[in-house]
Image (spheres, grey):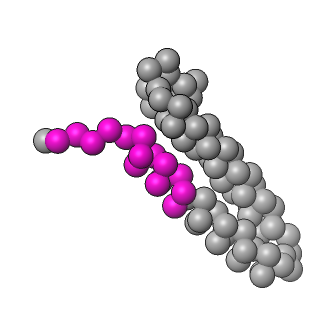
Amino acid sequence: MDADDETGFDIADTPEKRELKSRLMELREEHRALDSAIFALQEQSGGDALQLARLKKRKLVLRDQIQWIEDRLTPDIIA
């Protein structure tokens, strides 16, 4: 992670890049929250298996969305 990844914004960014970075931060936060919720549900004896499956599926969707945005933000490097 470089310096502008820490803050999320760079003066040279286009409005589209700033929007993607903002959305990326939101998705990462939701992904972390789902981690906590899944862990808590797994710790409960007799936790709701259906709810657990839904949370895990949502987490996978978020991971895919995060990856898509990261791919858009990473410049293509021609070797």
Q: Is residue 79 left or right of residue 63?
A: left
Furthest toward the left, the residue is 79
Locate residue 43, reporting x and y percent: 80, 66
Locate residue 17, reporting x and y percent: 49, 35
> Residue 68 lies in magenta, yes or no?
yes
Q: In the rendered view, would you say 51 is above or below 77?
A: below
Task: Give the prevailing secondary structure in the magenta stretch.
Answer: helix
Q: Quadrant of the N terminus?
A: top left
Q: In the rendered view, would you say 55 is above or below 49?
A: above
**Would residue 33 be seen by someone viewing this image from the given angle?**
yes
Q: In the rendered view, would you say 74 is above or below 56?
A: above
Residue depicted at x 81% and y 67%? 41
Residue depicted at x 51% and y 37%? 16
Q: Is residue 76 left or right of residue 30?
A: left
Q: Is residue 27 left or right of residue 71?
A: right
Locate residue 71, reporting x and y percent: 40, 49
Locate residue 9, reporting x and y percent: 54, 25
Residue depicted at x 49% and y 48%? 69
- The stretch of residues the image draws in magenta is 64-78
Task: State the image quarter where residue 54 is shown.
Answer: bottom right
Task: State the image quarter where residue 21 is shown.
Answer: top right
Furthest toward the front, the residue is 15
Q: Quadrant of the C terminus?
A: top left
Residue depicted at x 46% and y 54%? 68
**Would residue 6 be seen by someone viewing this image from the given angle?**
no
> Residue 38 lies in magenta, yes or no?
no
Q: How many marks?
A: 0
Q: Is residue 62 left or right of residue 12?
A: right
Q: In the rendered view, would you say 68 is above or below 12?
A: below
Task: State the image quarter where residue 22 is shown.
Answer: top right
